[in-house]
Amino acid sequence: MSLNLKSLFDFLKSNPSEQDCIGYFEKRRWKDKVISPFDPNSKVYKCANNRYKCKNTGKYFTVKTGSIFRNSNISLQKWFLALYLLSTDKKGISSCELAKKLNITQKSAWFVLHRLRYISNLPEFKVMLGNSVEIDETFIGGKNKNRHRDKKAPHCQGRNWKDKIPVLGIIERDGNLITQTIPNTKQETVNPIIRANVKEGSNVYTDEWYRHGDLYKNFNHQIVNHSIKQYVNGNASTNAIENAWSHLKRTIIGTYHQVSKKHLQRYLNEFTLRFNTRKHSEQERFDLVLLSSVGKSLSYKELCKISI
């Protein structure tokens, strides 16, 4: 079985059945040999209703077992459409919109999207960045002029800790992006994260916020001074990471409108996935996320218990 994932029109035109989706997932997950999630060395018997039996353990399983789709009453056909829409739409899709498209409740759609965001944190992109790397932080939250007067801060420039969430961004030029929520933008908080994700000796470009730090000890650190309206200083600039922030904020403002501090990192994972797979075809991105669902699980109770 194959899916036509060149466009949404082609995806809907092919209109795969539930059995087609099960067959597609089985082919991608197991290739030509079904493997028991309970004992990889066990012989497997094929049973009715897309079930299999593990000989060594006596347990039954399906292709959903041991994946993010386990114990879900939502059909795999709807999961596939949700995954396609989330991974291909440049600004994501809201739970209200997805609920209408899948004919499910908004609560179910919200949970579906968060489980897909959960598996979007792919290990393929957890690699050390190098060569030329830009670093900057941004603050997610409302504009100062729109705040309640108790929260307004004179000359704030967006750095109000009452309702803003700081996010660190590290991007390799023409390469991958890393985004991470942080408690603050102090040097002692940010610098260890940078050293853990950037190869020593790389060219690191930042704005003047980092001018008093010690990045020069591990990297070729160069600065652009935005306070004097300097945006390019030789090879130094933060234009690439600023472009990423622009796309992120348009995604939040245009689609989600607001996000909570509790779940922001998952929205960042979703955005970072699309950014880092910008050169992938829709088919490649779909398969990449689909395979990442194996070995993952997230219950509704676990999702709601996440602490901040």
Image: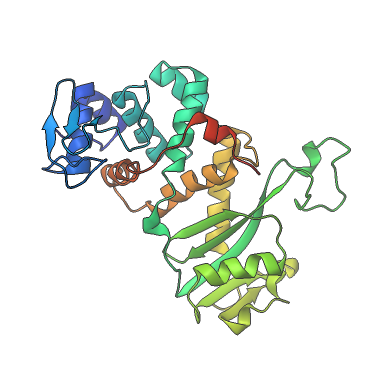
State whether residue 199 is above or below residue 278: below
Dividing the image into 4 quarters, which one contains the C terminus? top right
Dividing the image into 4 quarters, which one contains the N terminus? top left
State whether residue 115 is above or below residue 277: above
State the image coordinates of residue 191 (x, y, percent, origin top left): 63, 70
State the image coordinates of residue 256 (x, y, percent, origin top left): 57, 33
Q: Which residue is drawn at 34% across and 45% down?
A: 292
Q: Residue at x 54, y 63 (%)?
A: 170
Q: Which of 54 and 151 is in front in this view?
A: 54
Q: Is residue 138 left or right of residue 95?
A: right
Callout count: 0
State the image coordinates of residue 246 (x, y, percent, origin top left): 57, 50
Q: Which of the 4 image quadrants contains residue 208?
A: bottom right
Q: Which residue is drawn at 52% across and 22% down?
A: 107
Q: Which of the 4 image quadrants contains residue 210?
A: bottom right
Q: Nearer the viewer, residue 70 or 174?
A: 70
Q: Is residue 99 left or right of residue 72?
A: right
Query: Would residue 195 be seen by someone viewing this image from the given angle?
Result: yes
Q: In this view, does 182 lie to the left or right of 82?
A: right
Q: Nearer the viewer, residue 47 or 273?
A: 47
Colouring method of the image? rainbow
Query: Would residue 231 be seen by someone viewing this image from the given angle?
Result: no
State whether residue 204 is above or below residue 185: below
State whether residue 304 is above or below residue 168: above
State the image coordinates of residue 25 (x, y, percent, origin top left): 23, 35
